[in-house]
Amino acid sequence: MTQSVSEAIRRRLDWRSFADSPVPREDVLAVLDAARWAGSGKNSQHWKFILVEGREELRWLAEHAPSGRWLAGAAFAVIVTTDPSFPYHKLDAGRALTYMQLEAWSRGIVSCITTGFDERAIKERYGIPEKRSIDLIAGFGYPDRRLIGRKSRRPLSELAYEGRYGMPLRP
Ligand SMILES: Cc1cc2nc3c(=O)[nH]c(=O)nc-3n(C[C@H](O)[C@H](O)[C@H](O)COP(=O)(O)O)c2cc1C
């Protein structure tokens, strides 16, 4: 998928149903690698990512993620953990996620995230230290069908002001 960054930002959809085909290792590693190129507060780079592959393991994750049941069909997942002693740690997690999702999209790989999961069970299964935060789990894979659907977004005029809160943007 050759798209400019600008196009990818406007077209990428969060996608939750995946083809049952593996993603080559090279692409999996490129997606993970994209995460570390994101910025983080004070360049602290306190992320730790856990790659999860294998149908049984992904099913286990899905069973422990009430708002991420679709993880069961993903080709791989990435658990994003951060150090919560940084007040901006969730922002750092979100930036790493965005880089991974855009890298994936550029390779024809779709993705979505879940933020609703059993943190305790996941920490135990993957040996994640108690003091770390699990901020999100992203699932990736090839789409199971043609990507249709448009992003539904509010117009810029509803979201952005100019100069002062509530003041409309000039054209
Ligand atoms: C902070 C955050 C939490 C989210 N949590 C979940 C989730 O738990 N489960 C899920 O299926 N999607 C989750 N999503 C995905 C959103 O539903 C999705 O980004 C939104 O519907 C826009 O999708 P679109 O870009 O395809 O239009 C989450 C997204 C964000 C940014």
Image (spheres, rainbow, N blue to C red):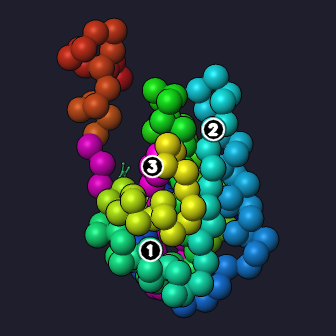
> Residue type at mark 3?
Asp
Label placed on residue 61 = 1
Residue labelled with disc 2: 46
- In the image, what residue occupies the spot 54% across and 87% down? 55
Report if residue 101 is visible in the image. no
Q: Nearer the viewer, residue 170 or 71?
A: 71
Percent x, y for residue 14? 42, 63
Report the Cα–Cα distance between label 2 and label 3. Answer: 12 Å
Q: Is residue 3 above or below residue 86?
A: below
- The C terminus - image quarter: top left
For mark 2, give the secondary structure: loop
Label placed on residue 135 = 3
Q: Nearer the viewer, residue 53 or 124?
A: 124
* Mark 2 Cα-neighbour bin, 10 Å: few <14, some 14–19, many ≥20: some
Instruction: Give residue 100's quadrant in the image.
Output: bottom right
* Mark 3 Cα-neighbour bin, 10 Å: few <14, some 14–19, many ≥20: many
The answer to whether the residues at label 2 and label 3 have Cβ atoms under 8 Å apart is no
> Residue type at mark 1?
Leu
* Mark 1 Cα-neighbour bin, 10 Å: few <14, some 14–19, many ≥20: many
> Residue type at mark 2?
His
Instruction: Return the disc, 2 or 3, that comes first in the chain's sequence.
Output: 2
- In the image, what residue occupies the spot 61% across and 44% down? 47
Question: Horizontally, is 81 left or right of 69 in the view?
Answer: right
Magenta extent: 133-154
- In the image, what residue occupies the spot 61% across and 89% down? 21
For mark 3, give the secondary structure: strand
Report the Cα–Cα distance between label 1 and label 3. Answer: 14 Å
Whereabouts is ligand 1, in terms of quadrant?
bottom left
Residue 138 colored in magenta in the image? yes
